[in-house]
Image: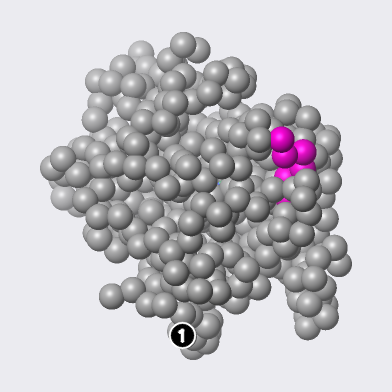
Amino acid sequence: MAQRRYLLSEDAIPTRWYNVAADLSSMPPPPLHPGTGQPIGPDDLSPIFPMALIEQEVSGERWIPIPDPVREIYSMWRPTPLHRALGLERALGTTCRIFYKYEGVSPAGSHKPNTSVPQAYYNREEGVTRLATETGAGQWGSALAFACGLFGITCKVFMVRASYDSKPYRQSMIRTWGGEIVASPSPDTAAGRAILEATPDSTGSLGMAISEAVEDAATRDDTNYALGSVLNHVLLHQTVVGQEARAQLAMAGAEPDVVIGCVGGGSNFAGLAFPFLADKAAGSDIRIVAAEPAACPTLTRGHYGYDFGDTAGMTPLLAMHSLGHGFVPPAIHSGGLRYHGMAPLVSHLVHTGLVEARAYTQSECFAEAVRFARAEGIVPAPEPSHAIRAVVEEVERAEQEGVERTILFNLCGHGNFDMAAYDAYLSGTMTDIELPQEELDRAAAEMEGLPTLG
Ligand SMILES: *Cc1c(COP(=O)(O)O)cnc(C)c1O
């Protein structure tokens, strides 16, 4: 009988995070202060982040130790299993080997607690008693509410209106773990009130919700801000995923030819892929693929330049692929992939050719999610269905080329709270949104006048 799951014991939980910055031949351009246009320093960030995370954000050290209390909480669900997708391989009739790292076994049902736990920990260590954040699909909000609860910190979540309305049980989960939650745009902040005045029926966006959470944190002494993706320290925390996957693939006697993840802000992708990137930098011909929605095509159709991380223009300017900070993505079911920007590290890797990007429509992704659920049992979150679509494309390619490949992807969350999306797909009412070029041009025009990248 072929082995289906590769499990590590608790003492194999990584003891350190891997910082890809140490192995890059060139670094992404630095974040700039929105007022002065100069590179930001620690003092610019200290009003909303604890110093430990600011240090990780700019660190050049290859390995950063994971504090014992964080590792102990990780042991609630880590190490996560690596699955051989035997069922999917059979359904596809392929001789390619497909493996997936399953992060849906965490309490929140996704990879997000890998970073919410250390973020809550470092904030509490520095005396912070309240955290404000945004959430798209609700995954990050629930992960942070869970972590804050463990450390006795209050958690305020601004949840994108489109998801707030379509995923009421994510709200319940946040409240169950003790979090406070409001739909964004909300009347609780100046940024939210301004948007509501202009567009009272706004479906919200991650960019708007970030503006609200940053404003909340910046205007209260007891409150810091926490971000669930995009920033270097968030990607760093996720590298437990790829480190474990490497050890598990070694158990299986396998080496990946292709590593795939879906990208919203880039963190689950980075968490799996970065520990394999050192191999690529050292000359291995491993390919690394980032899969995004055609309705929010940041890497495949966005501009690479400086842009704000939020809608209101309060955050530092980040060097990234962006659709423009005012871009409001269509209300697709992959709420976690509706972000106008991208992690500067991931953008840099795409820009320098180390990472490939592809975009897929939501119906073609749901078709693969349903095939996957029937073959593997697990119902994927809508976000990693993009990774599964890319896996199938890789299998088709390999068949055409007459080669057998080993493919690894991140099944970064389960879809048990996303049944309305599956209903839409199964009843044939799901629609795909084509973004006209003029709309993207209009959104990108907002980046004009901001610093550019050569
Ligand atoms: C948040 C989330 C994403 C998108 O965020 P990344 O930082 O790109 O990983 C994707 N999938 C799931 C399940 C999520 O919760």
Vertical arrangement, residue 31 with respect to residue 324, above or below: above
Q: Nearer the viewer, residue 131 or 43?
A: 43
- Give me the residue at 58% from left, 24% from top: 70
Crowding near pointer 1: few (<14 within 10 Å), some, many (20+)?
A: few
Q: Position of residue 83 (x, y in %)?
A: 43, 26
Vertical arrangement, residue 19 with respect to residue 107, above or below: below
- Give me the residue at 41% from left, 77% from top: 451
Left/right placement of residue 32 relative to residue 18 reads: right
Q: Position of residue 392 (x, y in %)?
A: 36, 48
- Give me the residue at 83% from left, 80% from top: 197
Magenta-tinted stretch? 127-132
Q: Position of residue 268 (x, y in %)?
A: 48, 43
| Mark 1 residue's CB less than 8 Å from ligand 1 | no
Quadrant holding the N terminus? top left
Taking the view exactly as shown, the residue that stands out farthest to the right is 187
Left/right placement of residue 118 relative to residue 155 reads: left
